[in-house]
Amino acid sequence: MALPAIAPPVRAESPPVSVCIDPEPPPWSYWKSDGEGKPTNELTGFSVDLVRRLFREAGREARFRTDIPWTRCVHDLRTQKSGFGMDIYEGGPHAAQLVYSVRYYTLTPQLFTLRDHPIEVLQPSDLKRYKGCGIVGGAYEHYGLKAEDLDISANGYAGVVQKLKGHHCDYFVEELEILAGMRLSHEDYLDDPEIAHRPLKGVKRPSLHLVAARDSAEAALMPKLNAEIEAMERAGELAALWRKYAGDIPYSR
């Protein structure tokens, strides 16, 4: 008598991975525009495509969470020990509680001032002799600046530029590629005739990373994600993906 066939066990699908993201500015992550140039609810950009690819290769689906700023994102990662954050700089007060992916982009720090109001800054510590402005949720530790060293009240780049032009501060600091990316959304601050910018010596160039809470289940995925990032760079795919969204803005890992 033949034994009945036994069906193989059904393999449960892995649940989606939550990835928090603070949309804007391009080319990393931004809302896709419709035919009239108005933003839709569809995310696009270099980092969005990259993260989708990384998790797909790891057998997971990335679901982006856009309803919280990155500071709240990091808090939730640490306390709930679930999910990922993306486009996050390495370092800061909670770095020891997080696991970072290998870098996938490195940026260029710059000092922005008014052309008719230059300041003398030879090293990062000189910044503290002047009044600086910052953006709510911005990361400034790599400039040697703490929250109390800056007026961090501007909402977005238009706000910090307005404060600078209104002489509410002497400078702001930001990465060159971020302001270059704003040109893609028709906000060109780099070519503003009233504003000057230059590199800052002695400042560590910040890199972008995926992060998860240390000892979390998500952290166990990092080796797979890292291997895929390295493979993409060797194949020239990271640079090609960057050019797709950033055009002639140089790619630097």
Image: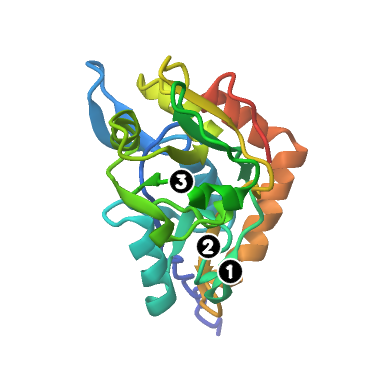
In space, the residues marked 1 and 2 are separated at their CA atoms by 5 Å
Quadrant of the snapshot with the C terminus: top right
- Residue at position x 45%, y 55% in the image: 61
User: Is residue 247 in view from this perspective?
Assistant: yes
Asked if the residues shown at circle 1 and circle 3 are in contact, with their CB atoms under 8 angstroms apart, the answer is no
Along the viewing direction, whichever of 161 and 101 lies nearer the viewer: 161
Which residue occupies the foreground of this view, 43 or 247? 247
| Residue 108 placement: quadrant | top right
Element on which disc 3 rests: loop
Q: Which residue is mark 1?
A: 99
Q: Nearer the viewer, residue 174 or 242?
A: 174
Compared with 137, 174 (above or below) is above
Q: Amino acid at mark 1?
A: Val
- Compared with 67, 108 (above or below) is above
Cα separation, mark 1 vs mark 3, equals: 35 Å
Across and down, in percent, residue 40 comes to: 24, 32
Q: Is residue 208 visible?
A: no
Q: Earlier in the sequence, mark 2 or mark 3?
A: 3
Which quadrant of the rendered structure holds the N terminus? Answer: bottom right
In contact (CB < 8 Å): disc 1 and disc 2: yes
List x then y, in percent, for residue 5: 52, 76
Select label 2 or label 3 by which is in front: 3
Quote the CA–CA distance across marks 2 and 3.
33 Å
Q: How many marks?
A: 3
**Does residue 191 sit above or below 219 in this rendering?**
above
For label 3, the residue is 130
Along the horizontal axis of the image, is 121 left or right of 32? right
Return the residue found at the far right: 234
**Which element type, helix, strand or loop, lies under badge 1?**
strand
User: Would you call the spot at circle 3 few (<14 residues within 10 Å), some (14-19), or many (20 or more)?
Assistant: some
Q: Which residue is mark 2?
A: 211
Along the line of sight, which residue is nearer the eye, 132 or 183?
132
